[in-house]
Amino acid sequence: MIDFHTHTVFSDGELIPAELARRARVAGYRALAMTDHADLSNVDIILENIHRFAKKHGHFFDIDVFAGVELTHVPPGLIGEMTDYARKAGAEIVVCHGETIVEPVADGTNLAAIEARVDVLAHPGLITEVEVKLAAEYGVCLEITTRKGHSLTNGHVAALARKHGAKLVINNDAHAPGDLVGSDMRRRIALGAGLSLEEYRQAEENSRQLAQELMKR
């Protein structure tokens, strides 16, 4: 299993990177992106600390660790600029906090993130067909999330992704130890969102391919 959306104490997560890496490995994950909530005020601090851990100690945990950010509540007009900034600052992966129905995310965030060509649009809520079509065209992965609340619109995201050929990945959005679901629950949540077994396997393959791409950057 691979997860591209997790949080540490460098934003609102409960775990330091070492414990997050260890718990993820024990749960069965072989690659993990640490993507703390970021805006211009903290993006450099997050990336500096995660890179320090990943480069100096990450290999001791028998899990590939990617340093990234989740751009969160960044105004839509600034998402393109912040995506470029994060990548120049060393982000190996850029996730954007999508328009989940359980938080007051600004209208236009999903579209701006897709136009910025982030790697993953997290919990995109009631994403539109136009946005899903563009995500498919640009190769932006849409997230099926295992996280409570955000997962309420998984079925909508899955249906539109199927219709328009957009790539799906499955992420935990982990903030605490109990958020790292095992392989069986991960599969059940995907099937509960309406994915077929083959579509679930394809989502897992999409994660594997993205991980390979990140390693080449």
Image (cartoon, rainbow, N blue to C red):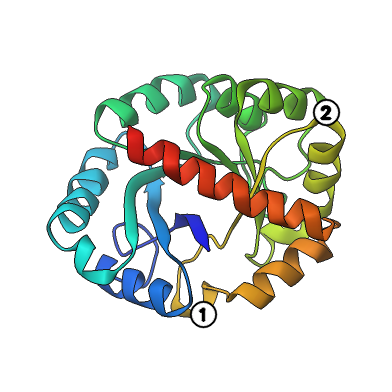
| Residue shown at the point (67%, 48%) measured from the top left | 100
Q: Position of residue 92 (x, y in %)?
A: 34, 38
- Figure disc tally: 2
User: How many neighbours does mark 1 have within 10 angstroms: few (below 14), some (14-19), or many (20 or more)?
Assistant: few
The amino acid type found where label 1 is placed reads Gly
Q: Dot 2: what SS? A: helix
Q: Residue 11: which disc?
A: none
| Residue shown at the point (43%, 42%) measured from the top left | 212
Point out the tag, 1 or 2, that comes first from the N-terminus.
Answer: 2
Judging depth in this view, the residue of 56 and 127 nearest the camera is 56
Query: Quick one: quadrant of the C terminus?
Result: top left
Badge 1 is on which residue?
178
Badge 2 is on which residue?
129
85 vs 57: above or below? above
Q: Dot 1: what SS? A: helix
Judging depth in this view, the residue of 110 and 202 nearest the camera is 202
Residue 153 visible from this viewpoint? no
| Residue shown at the point (79%, 54%) measured from the top left | 198
User: How many neighbours does mark 2 have within 10 angstroms: few (below 14), some (14-19), or many (20 or more)?
Assistant: some
| Residue shown at the point (16%, 52%) measured from the top left | 55
30 vs 144: above or below? below
Q: Position of residue 148 (x, y in %)?
A: 67, 67
